[in-house]
């Protein structure tokens, strides 16, 4: 796992901990206005032996967890770190990430893992948006071998317990994790906020505060 501070100022008293999606870095969310939030981005789930001891979260008066896509799944491995967070939000993801009814259909996940190449990577990025074109604001610069290892690592995670999320934000046109599957999963589990967007919804938001509302 890797991390990136989008904003980190000594005077800030509010933290947003963001668990990113597969293959991503900070580019999908770097346009969001941080205001007076420190924003720590976690990504790259190849190696899940990650210590948060290097960060002092005790200084924050308010702490928020926002997870997107596979980040919703990966965050469950760090429940002990997330004790005391004021709000936990899942965006276009579930804690059953590889599942025919509640996540990415099993066959699609396996085929993607087995045959990952530059063409399928570009198709994945296109499918995150409704225009079917590569978005110049989203770049995947990591080698394909790393991305494949990340898929395998996620596949091997076995959750013994699941986080309780306060809100699930679900796009109405998600071509990565089917909208229907997300609605099936979150029904009767938490509050659902439906939005008119695709798997990568961040372009319709201007700030992190917009996501928290």
Image (spheres, helix red, strand yellow):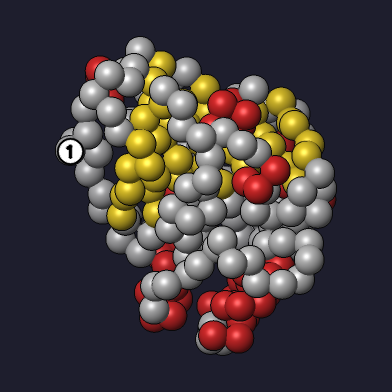
Residue shown at 46% from the left, 32% from the top: 34
Q: Nearer the viewer, residue 8 or 122?
A: 8
> Is residue 111 rendered to the left or right of residue 46?
right
Residue 56 visible to the viewer: yes
Residue shown at 34% from the left, 17% from the top: 13
Q: Is residue 96 above or below residue 87?
A: below
Q: Nearer the viewer, residue 73 or 123?
A: 123
Q: Tag 1's secondary structure? A: loop
Q: Residue furthest top?
A: 61
The spot of residue 99 in percent (x, y) is 66, 59
The spot of residue 3 in percent (x, y) is 31, 49
**Count of labels in the image:** 1
Q: Residue furthest left?
A: 54
> Is residue 118 rendered to the left or right of residue 52?
right
The residue that disc 1 covers is 54
Residue 73 visible to the viewer: no
Q: Is residue 205 above or below residue 132?
A: above
Residue shown at 17% from the left, 38% from the top: 54
Looking at the rendered image, the quarter that the C terminus falls into is top right
Residue shown at 45% from the left, 40% from the top: 18
Looking at the rendered image, the quarter that the N terminus falls into is bottom left
């Amino acid at each position: 796992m890797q991390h990136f501070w989008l904003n980190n100022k000594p005077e800030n008293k509010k933290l947003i901990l963001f668990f990113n999606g597969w293959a991503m870095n900070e580019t999908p969310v770097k346009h969001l206005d941080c205001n007076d939030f420190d924003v720590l981005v976690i990504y790259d789930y190849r190696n899940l032996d990650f210590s948060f001891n290097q960060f002092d979260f005790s200084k924050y008066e308010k702490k928020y967890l926002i997870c997107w896509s596979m980040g919703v799944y990966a965050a469950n491995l760090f429940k002990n770190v997330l004790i005391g967070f004021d709000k936990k939000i899942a965006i276009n993801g579930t804690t059953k990430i590889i599942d025919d009814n509640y996540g990415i259909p099993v066959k699609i996940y396996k085929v993607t893992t087995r045959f990952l190449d530059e063409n399928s990577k570009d198709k994945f990025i296109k499918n995150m948006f409704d225009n079917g074109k590569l978005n110049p604001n989203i770049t995947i610069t990591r080698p394909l071998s790393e991305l494949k290892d990340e898929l395998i690592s996620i596949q091997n995670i076995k959750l013994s317990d699941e986080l309780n999320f306060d809100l699930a934000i679900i796009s109405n046109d998600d071509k990565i994790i089917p909208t229907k599957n997300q609605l099936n999963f979150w029904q009767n589990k938490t509050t659902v906020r439906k939005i008119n967007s695709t798997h990568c919804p961040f372009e319709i938001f201007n700030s992190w505060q917009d996501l928290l509302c």
